[in-house]
Image (cartoon, rainbow, N blue to C red):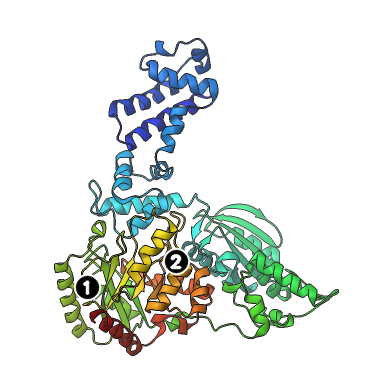
């Protein structure tokens, strides 16, 4: 048995004990023991078999017993029990430069952070700034360390993968030998989590293009390179696969490699019923190719209206396309304004004025400021005096910026019993209220649903924020009956938020389609904590499209007068 294997386990025990804030002498004994084992000159198994471990300086009876148990059985019960007593992700967090056991313990105890992705999200919401031993610079270093570590992981937020994919696609589009090139795969379908990048290009000289792609400066490693396909690892760590086909094959290949597998299988079945065959090389009647110059023509040849890539998940899109055009999906230009923006009043990085000016640069007609409420003390939640001060500032800024409506709101925590965070008279002063669950996630589905339903039933609640509380790649959503929540939204006129933060994208696209069918309005909100995150609205739009949403389904696609009247009516109800 290798010494470094045993030493690694002893060191990990020491670190785990330090995270648990156990006896520091005990923790140090295991870490010292790891160093001693690693530097042994004699064979470890011989020392164990001859019971001579305790003769070595620094190894007492307790440590000797643990080492002996592991060497003889290949397991150590104490180690397994210790590992099981804390979240596994805490050890992963120690890989971040500058994070030691003490800081990891603080992050876990104070903020409930249990893995890298939840740590990343906390950094982006400025949660670490006020923690003892942290601060702005430490938070920046932690975030930079996470970015470095992510290059060696296998899953990416849609937003991350999309940005990386475009840097790989643009050189292809500029190559004179390429007639067409596109994103494909799960990125083109706007899946919320992406494992790799798929690209499809058309060229007469396919080998020239695969060779060109393999030599791009952002390629770290060439996994394989052939005449029509190359697979590479980019500097970011993500894998990118390129298929290069002849121009006449391009629409068929683009469709095939966009997927999804389930959509393609259903389409092949439909083609077979019509006596046709479809694959990445073409649509065939017998051996004869049915010429299609675009995907739209391909679908038409199968008797279908065009199905946008985002809908290709075999969730009813083929049946719908047989009976008429699919809905005209939401576009970026349809968004008229944004809600759910945090400022320096709570945990945001920018002032209200800076957020307003950025919204004006986007051409928005209205903006909704909604800092955290008082229960969210970890996020600098607003006390009554802060609310009055913020309200007065917004009144002044309305005069300074007459071309945009500045709405005064709050993101109110939903307390454990379903109550909101302020008395009714104070809640009635806001132009809008977003009610959100931020704590006490470990409830049964029935209790969590009742908690949220009670909050949504309050007349002041305008929107329900991030309905399931999930953090992608970090935390599963809490158990909740979404169908009941949607029925409650319809009953009480509550708008459901599609939180556009790349780490949330919540409400899930699968639930958006149901909300649309029921007539529940959706608001696509960036949940921005800095001006740069206003751009996250684009990821929300992509997911909204995946959820079949058109502009009439989205609250913030309506013009400012309509929105103002909607909010005013809700506010009047809250006051009565």
Secondary structure beneath dot 1 equals helix
In which quadrant is the N terminus drawn?
top right
Say if 120 sits above or below 387 in the image: above
In the visual, does 211 lie left or right of 90?
right
Q: Is residue 459 above or below residue 416?
A: below
Residue tagged 1 = 424
Q: Position of residue 224 (x, y in %)?
A: 66, 53
> Mark 1–mark 2 contact, CB under 8 Å?
no
The circle on residue 359 is none
At x 45%, y 58%, the residue is 472
Q: Quadrant of residue 283?
A: bottom right
Which residue is pictured at 14% across the width and 68% down the height?
A: 385
Q: Measure the C-alpha gap from mark 1 to mark 2.
A: 30 Å
Q: Report whether 564 appears left or right of 289.
A: left
Q: Secondary structure at mark 2?
A: loop
The residue to which callout 2 is attached is 505
Residue drawn at x 39%, y 86% as measured from the top left? 558
């Amino acid at each position: 048995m290798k010494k470094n294997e045993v030493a690694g386990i002893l060191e990990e025990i020491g670190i785990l004990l330090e995270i648990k804030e156990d006896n520091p002498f005990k923790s140090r004994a295991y870490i010292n023991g790891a160093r001693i084992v690693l530097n042994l000159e004699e064979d470890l198994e011989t020392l164990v078999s001859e019971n001579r471990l305790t003769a070595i300086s620094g190894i007492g009876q307790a440590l000797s017993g643990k080492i002996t148990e592991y060497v003889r059985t290949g397991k150590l019960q104490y180690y397994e029990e210790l590992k099981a007593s804390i979240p596994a992700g805490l050890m992963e967090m120690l890989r971040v430069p500058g994070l030691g056991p003490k800081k990891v313990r603080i992050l876990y105890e104070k903020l409930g952070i249990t893995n890298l992705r939840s740590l990343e999200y906390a950094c982006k919401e400025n949660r670490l700034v006020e923690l003892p031993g942290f601060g702005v610079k430490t938070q920046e270093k932690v975030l930079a360390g996470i970015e470095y570590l992510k290059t060696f992981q296998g899953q990416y937020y849609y937003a991350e993968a999309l940005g990386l994919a475009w840097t790989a696609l643009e050189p292809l589009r500029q190559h004179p030998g390429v007639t067409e090139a596109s994103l494909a795969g799960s990125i083109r379908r706007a899946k919320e989590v992406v494992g790799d990048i798929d690209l499809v290009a058309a060229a007469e000289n396919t080998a020239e293009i695969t060779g060109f792609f393999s030599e791009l400066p952002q390629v770290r490693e060439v996994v394989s390179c052939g005449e029509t396909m190359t697979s590479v690892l980019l500097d970011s760590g993500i894998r990118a696969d390129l298929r290069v086909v002849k121009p006449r094959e391009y629409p068929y290949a683009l469709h095939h490699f966009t997927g999804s597998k389930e959509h393609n299988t259903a389409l092949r079945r439909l083609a077979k019923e019509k006596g046709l065959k479809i694959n990445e090389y073409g649509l065939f009647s017998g051996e004869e190719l049915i010429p299609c110059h675009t995907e739209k023509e391909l679908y038409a040849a199968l008797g279908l209206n065009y199905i946008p890539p985002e809908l290709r998940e075999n969730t009813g899109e083929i049946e719908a396309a047989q009976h008429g055009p699919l809905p005209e999906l939401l576009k970026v230009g349809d968004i008229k304004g944004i809600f759910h923006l945090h400022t320096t009043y709570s945990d945001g990085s920018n002032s209200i004025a800076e957020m307003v000016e950025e919204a004006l640069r986007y051409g928005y007609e209205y903006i909704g400021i909604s800092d955290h409420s008082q229960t969210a003390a970890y996020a600098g939640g607003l006390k009554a005096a802060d609310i009055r001060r913020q309200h007065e500032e917004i009144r002044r800024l309305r005069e300074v910026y007459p071309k945009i409506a500045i709405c005064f709101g709050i993101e109110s925590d939903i307390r454990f019993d379903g109550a909101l965070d302020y008395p009714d008279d104070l809640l009635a002063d806001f132009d809008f209220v977003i009610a959100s669950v931020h704590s006490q996630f470990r409830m049964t589905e029935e209790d969590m649903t009742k908690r949220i339903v009670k909050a949504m039933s309050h007349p002041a609640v305008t929107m329900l924020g991030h309905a399931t509380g999930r953090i992608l790649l970090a935390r599963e959503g809490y158990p909740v009956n979404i169908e009941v929540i949607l029925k409650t939204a319809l009953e009480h006129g509550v708008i459901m938020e599609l939180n556009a933060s790349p780490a949330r994208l919540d409400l899930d696209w699968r639930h958006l389609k149901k909300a649309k069918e029921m007539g529940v309005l959706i608001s696509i909100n960036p949940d921005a904590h800095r001006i740069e995150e206003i751009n996250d609205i684009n990821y929300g739009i992509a997911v909204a499209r995946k959820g079949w949403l058109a502009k009439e389904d989205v609250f913030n696609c309506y013009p400012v007068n309509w929105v103002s009247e909607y909010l005013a009516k809700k506010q009047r109800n809250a006051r009565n």
